[in-house]
Image (cartoon, rainbow, N blue to C red):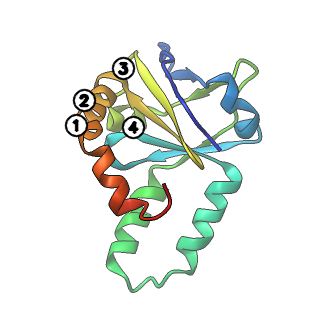
Amino acid sequence: MFLGSHAPRLDDKGRLTLPAKFRDELEGGLVITKGQERCLYVFPMAEFTRISESLRTAPVTAKALRDYSRVFFSSAADDVPDRQGRIIIPAPLRTYAGLTRDCVVNGANTRVEIWDAQRWQAYLEGQEESFTELSEEVLPGVI
């Protein structure tokens, strides 16, 4: 499980150092792809395989599934962190997420999200106000 928020910097070569607490789970390989709200999703290879299998078994007659799958898989890139825990974020993914230098890397349960720091701050400010109200809809009876 990935938890917490971290603020690494993207270097001039498009490399990002993963938080130390995330590295063990990602050292065997990972997949980076477009996520919602213009962030990037980083999945451990096993989780990406699980998601791929779920999408593979869904009916191809569903247009929304076809559309989502096309973007999700065509933008995906696999990588293995180097010895310093760095991964390379491909240029098209950096552009999609608006990544420059300052980034935020968030744990999001079974995935990691990479955000441009300013975009994350704006998103968070817009969401924190409604966070407590959402728990009643999203997690009824859980919390």
Residue 133 or residue 51, whichever sits in front: 133
Q: Give me the disc on residue 100.
A: 3
* Precedes in sequence: disc 1 or disc 3: 3
Residue flagged by tag 1: what amino acid is it?
Gly
* Residue depicted at 25% across the width and 31% down the height: 125
Residue mark closest to the camera, 1 vs 4: 1
Question: Spatial distance from mark 1 to mark 3, Cα to Cα?
Answer: 22 Å
Q: Secondary structure at mark 3?
A: loop
* Residue depicted at 44% across the width and 82% down the height: 60
Q: Going by the image, does 12 lie left or right of 116?
A: right
* Precedes in sequence: disc 2 or disc 3: 3
Q: Which residue is mark 1?
A: 126
Residue mark closest to the camera, 1 vs 2: 1
Does residue 139 sit above or below 20 in this rendering?
Answer: below
Task: Say few, some or many: other residues with alpha carbon within 10 Å of mark 1 (under 14 / 14 to 19 / 20 or more).
Answer: few
Q: Secondary structure at mark 4?
A: helix
Q: Are marks 1 and 2 in contact (CB under 8 Å)?
A: yes
Q: Position of residue 11 (x, y in %)?
A: 50, 14
Residue 135 or residue 78, whichever sits in front: 135
